Amino acid sequence: MAETVVGEPTTASPVAIFTAISGLYVAQSVIGGITWNGLPAVMRAEGLPLDRIGLLSLIILPWALKFLWSPAVERFRLPPQGRNRTGTIILVGGLISVAGLFLVGMIGPASLLPVLACLTIVAFAASTVDIACDGFAVQNLAEEHHGWGNAAQVGGAYLGSAIGAGLFLVLVDASGWRFAVWSMALLLLLLGLPFFLGPANRAKDAVREHTPSLLAAWRRPEIRRGLLAAAIYVVAQKASLAMVGPFLIDAGLDLATVGLLNGVGSMFVGVAAALAGGALVRVFGVRKVLVLALVLQATALFFFSVYDFQNIQSKMILMIVAIASSSGFMALGFVALYAQFMRWSDPRQAGVDFTLFQCMDALVSMAGGVVAGFVAEYLGYGIFFVGAGLVAVAAIPAIAAVSDRQ
């Protein structure tokens, strides 16, 4: 038996829990949007070379390695007896994230190494918060409400990306770096309020018998299968997108335009595609939606290559494809992938199991982003994007083999 509860885990309603965790997921994605979408475009506008911009992908390292401390986080969050400590973890991690962004605002985008150091600390704090948030959502949402939890995760990711990669760039262009970064830090504080004013204060005592561990996760074949699926899918669908922002800048778009594209894409196209992905998964199953998303992404990558080789002048077509690729096709595929991850996770230690899948995602994204920067810098965008498209095509039979039909 995993847990004997003295009373309910929380007295908060499903709506209150959904609202609270949505704010936390949006906050985490604001940080990611700044780091992996907004900052590369700013640095390119400052004149930094692509190979140095590619180093930003190293900030994914805490997200890639958080599985190492996820059991410790879960054991601290869920002590053998007493109330869960999700609120404590989220409070400390949130304050560290805010302080880190404050320092980044003071440093400025041209100082790459200090910015990397600060954002790595922020990533460590945010990734630890993510472990606690995932575990809290699974623990406190009844099974019939798990779909809302997944919607909060995916929808929050795209809304946060719209802010961190879209609004952030608009603010940088209009009011400068420091104002933009500090505005994002203030926003993080506001997004955490629904959690602390609601579910964080309503936890009940519990007696728990299951001890979360990596060994317990690794013994399950679903976990090993999920890690393979994550590696295949992310390298095909996601790793190449780190160069889309710099590509748009070099194609003649300014920071404000790229920011608007990121914002509109994430807020409207991404959310719409996430909802469509959820419906398609129910009708056609995970496997077909994953394959469809890979086909669409490969098509977009080939278009970028043709655009570069042929020196096409139509910026409108480029912007439409960029929005579809980085927001629409990504959302469509990752809703299906995360639905698969939820099926493979053990509810008794969801914070550990789901973290393992996310870490594989982050590890592959990090390695792919670094490689992408060097390939694009020394071989050119055209060769880079055609190669990325071929990788996506090659991944189709592999992802079909490891994912579920239903």
Image (tube, rainbow, N blue to C red):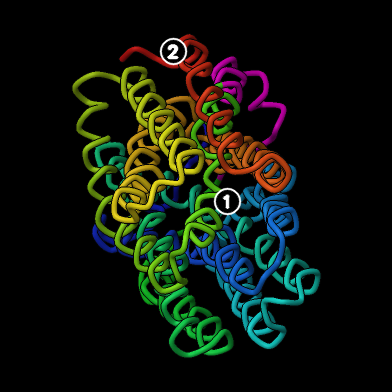
Q: Residues within 10 Å of mark 2 (few under 14, many from 20)?
A: some
The residue carrying mark 2 is 400
Note whether residue 62 is visible. no
Q: Are marks 1 and 2 in contact (CB under 8 Å)?
A: no
Q: Is residue 67 above or below residue 43?
A: above
Q: Residue at x 59, y 78 (%)?
A: 98
Most foreground residue, 185 or 76: 185
What type is the residue that disc 1 sits on?
Ile
Q: On the rendered structure, is 224 left or right of 316?
A: right
Per the model, the C-alpha gap separating discs 1 and 2 is 28 Å
Q: State yes or no: residue 214 in magenta.
A: yes
Which residue is outermost to the right?
A: 113
Looking at the image, residue 375 sits to the left or right of residue 27; the answer is right
**Numbered circle sitting on residue 203:** none
Q: Is residue 194 above or below residue 317?
A: below
Quarter holding the C terminus is top left
Q: Residue at x 73, y 72 (%)?
A: 115
Q: Position of residue 197 (x, y in %)?
A: 38, 77
Secondary element type, mark 2: helix
The magenta span reads 208-228
Residue 85 visible in the snapshot: yes
- The residue that label 1 is drawn on is 131
Foreground mark, 1 or 2, reads 2
Q: Residue 335: percent from the left, percent from the top?
A: 36, 37
Please check the rendered image and state whether residue 219 is part of the magenta-colored stretch, yes or no: yes
Magenta stretch, main secondary structure class: helix
400, 121: nearer the viewer: 400
Which of pointers 1 and 2 lies earlier in the amino acid sequence? 1
Q: Nearer the viewer, residue 182 or 26?
A: 182
Question: What residue is shown at x 60% (from left), y 34% (from top)?
Answer: 383
